[in-house]
Image (cartoon, helix red, strand yellow):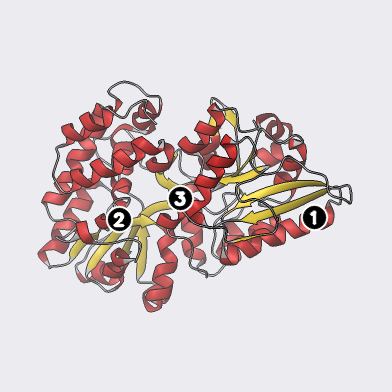
Amino acid sequence: MQTKLTRRTFLQVAGGTVLSTTLAGCFGVGSSQTTTGSGSSTVTVWDIRTGSEQKVVQTAVDSFNSAHPGIHVTINYFQNDPYKQKLQVAMGAHNPPDIFFGWGGGVLKSYIDANDVYDMTSDLNADPTWKNRFLPAVMSAVTFNDKIYGVPNSGMQPVLFFYNKNIFNQYHLSPPQTWSDLLAAINTLKQHNVIPIALAGGSQWPYLMYEEYLVDRYGGPAAFDAVLANQAGAWSQDAFIKANTAIQQLVTMGAFGSSFGSTIADTNQDAALVYTGRAGMMLQGNWNFPVFVTNSPQLVQSGQLGWFPFPAIEDGTGDPKDIAGNPCNFYSISSADKSPQNAVTFLKDANLSDSEVKQFVAVGDIPPVVGLESQLANAQNGDWLQYNYQLVQNAPHFQLSWDQALLPGPAQALLTNLSQLFLKQITPQQFSANMNKTIGTS
């Protein structure tokens, strides 16, 4: 199984250069359905996949071009770091690619508000088989005002607890199903000098996972929806105060040990604590599974790596089946595309086709496509793949990571304030007051 992108490289933005490209031309310049010398209409796609995933995507593109002589799809591959900045420049210049890779959420919404994204709703409604092919939980990240602006193009990345079964068995623990169960397990592990939960606070973004789940468990999706709707004082809702009080309760009782503020996720220091037996569990994205496969194959092969969903909160109103993470990545069509039906044809016929889905499953991805149960069961690490698939399949709501759902300014403020909250430098009420100042900003 290939090692997938970590969440950090999956989401971060920085400077850089083109990794590879099949289209000569100026960097950052898109295409608006040019016509080749052979009379084919060219559809340009921007993507960031690498390694085995890039090979799967390229195979799908090549097969599509062979089967559609009137349409020629050209795909450009960029390094992840500079991609968002280059897309933003191309959008601002009104010369984006015909199809662009994205994460949904706030950044996509900003392009939609600028009339830069093609509305795919009528195309999907015209072909219910295509529309109903995708698991409903993932579509919220590209659906705004009941209009759909993208389709999934990759595997799903829910956040869940990993745990070391050897440690749990040694101290007679079971996977916690409720918040009280979790607190009891934390106390037991701490009594035996085991870090209860590995947390890579030095990277800041892992803090988000606790905030997202606790707010949802206490108040359901409506709590964060109020933030997205720019409702005044939304960060002061009871769900946020209770969630942040619970976070500081965990810190005070030593749930994360004493060095979580300097532990780094990018180098998998949190996962190492779990597979070496120094920590009992870890709340992280499923992109960490290949880390365990690579660095502790015996733990995986012996069946001693376990997983469970974020526990239910006894007095919360949220559905314990809700999940958070990265629903998947998406392809959207730019409104600058003069012949969007060619792009639609490519997305319908080639993107997450039956053959592409099989290839993604073979490299360890879990596409958000209905009816994959038997295919996943027969794959390598089938138990793991099936668990993740069912987790999303049964979820009433799949919350996109908040640093993607929010615009860049509030997203950075959120990470800063969460770091201060976990380090007990501010109170839950101060967190809310600070974040309320970001409402309506970009």
358 to the left or right of 326? right
User: Residue most toward the front?
Assistant: 26
Task: Quote the CA–CA distance across marks 2 and 1.
Answer: 42 Å
Task: Quote the CA–CA distance across marks 3 and 1.
Answer: 35 Å
Q: On screen, 17 above or below 166? A: above
Q: Is residue 431 visible?
A: yes
**Tag 2 residue:** 203
Q: Position of residue 68 (x, y in %)?
A: 83, 51
Q: On screen, 372 above or below 306? A: above
- The residue positioned 11% from the left and 50% from the top of the image is 252
**Tag 1 residue:** 65
**Tag 3 residue:** 391
Q: Position of residue 381 (x, y in %)?
A: 50, 68
| Location of residue 218 (image quadrant) | top left
| Location of residue 66 (image quadrant) | bottom right
Q: Amino acid at mark 2?
A: Ser
As helix, strand or loop, the secondary structure at mark 3 comes to helix
364 to the left or right of 186? right
- The residue positioned 33% from the left and 30% from the top of the image is 223
Q: Position of residue 30 (x, y in %)?
A: 66, 44
Binning the other alpha carbons within 10 Å of mark 2 as few (below 14), some (14 to 19) or many (20 upward) gives some
Q: Nearer the viewer, residue 97 or 180?
A: 97
Tell me how many marks there are: 3
Q: Is residue 378 visible?
A: no
- The residue positioned 59% from the left and 62% from the top of the image is 53
Q: Amino acid at mark 1?
A: Asn
- The residue positioned 63% from the left and 34% from the top of the image is 94
